[in-house]
């Protein structure tokens, strides 16, 4: 069975309606997943990152409603933990409901790491490919679980791992069309 791995930004595009084309592709994948024609997966590391990013999105949205400048928002985001916690707590149930609804109600597999070989891979990803630690954990998880497709919008990440996985940067129009043509239409 083919496995499509959803990176954090793909899930965020879907949940936050940030990009209609990507949202449509994820909707098509969810339908194929429901029919048992493809498996959708992400990692426990992506879920942690997703929670963090969702709280940041809500915090920044609150700051914008308060008419804060860009500098004020960045300052508060990085330094005002009390305010961040207050705003986060107001949005906690909504964030949790949306993430759980996407991951658990739609049956997305949550992949993880389990052995020494995977941890050796993390070292190579960080030191040889210059990946951030979070990205290294995510990519190592995808590699260890032998995913078929790795879907992301992070061009920096996808360019560094394209020889390791069948990677599609869905913000790139050519790759998006290639994914539609070569994967979605073939399933």
Image (cartoon, rainbow, N blue to C red):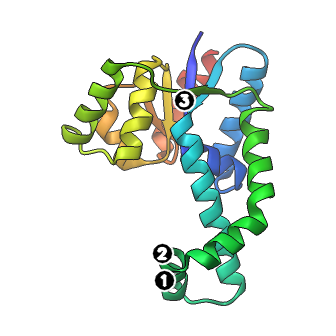
Could you say which quadrant of the image residue 65 lies in? bottom right
Please indicate whether residue 124 sits to the left or right of residue 100 in the image: left
Q: Nearer the viewer, residue 72 or 179?
A: 72
Q: Which residue is mark 2?
A: 78
Q: Position of residue 145 (x, y in %)?
A: 47, 18
Q: Nearer the viewer, mark 3 or mark 2?
A: 2
Q: Which residue is mark 1?
A: 75
Q: Dividing the image into 4 quarters, which one contains the N terminus? A: top right
Kindly give the residue lying farthest to the top in the view shown: 1
Q: Are marks 2 and 1 in contact (CB under 8 Å)?
A: yes
- Label 1 neighbourhood size at 10 Å, few (<14), some (14-19), many (20+)? few
Whichever of callouts 3 and 1 sits on the residue coming sooner in the sequence is 3
Q: Nearer the viewer, residue 100 or 155?
A: 100
The residue positioned 45% from the left and 26% from the top of the image is 142
Q: Which residue is mark 3?
A: 5
Residue 21 in sight = no
The image shows residue 104, relative to residue 97, as above or below, that is: above
Q: Position of residue 147 (x, y in %)?
A: 49, 20
């Amino acid at each position: 069975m083919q496995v499509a791995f959803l990176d954090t930004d793909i899930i965020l595009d879907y949940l936050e309606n940030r990009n209609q084309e990507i949202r449509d592709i994820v909707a098509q994948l969810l339908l194929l997943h429901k029919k048992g024609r493809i498996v959708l997966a992400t990692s426990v590391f992506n879920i942690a990152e997703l929670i963090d990013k969702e709280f940041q999105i809500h915090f920044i949205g609150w700051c914008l409603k308060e008419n804060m400048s860009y500098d004020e928002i960045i300052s508060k985001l990085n330094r005002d933990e009390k305010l961040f916690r207050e705003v986060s707590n107001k949005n906690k149930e909504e964030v949790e409901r949306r993430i759980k609804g996407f991951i658990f109600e739609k049956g997305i597999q949550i992949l993880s790491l389990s052995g020494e070989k995977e941890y050796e891979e993390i070292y190579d990803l960080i030191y040889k490919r210059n990946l951030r630690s979070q990205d290294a954990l995510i990519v190592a998880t995808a590699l260890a679980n032998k995913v078929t497709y790795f879907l992301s919008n992070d061009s920096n990440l996808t360019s560094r791992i394209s020889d390791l996985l069948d990677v599609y940067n869905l913000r790139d129009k050519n790759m998006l069309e290639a994914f539609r043509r070569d994967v979605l239409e073939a399933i």
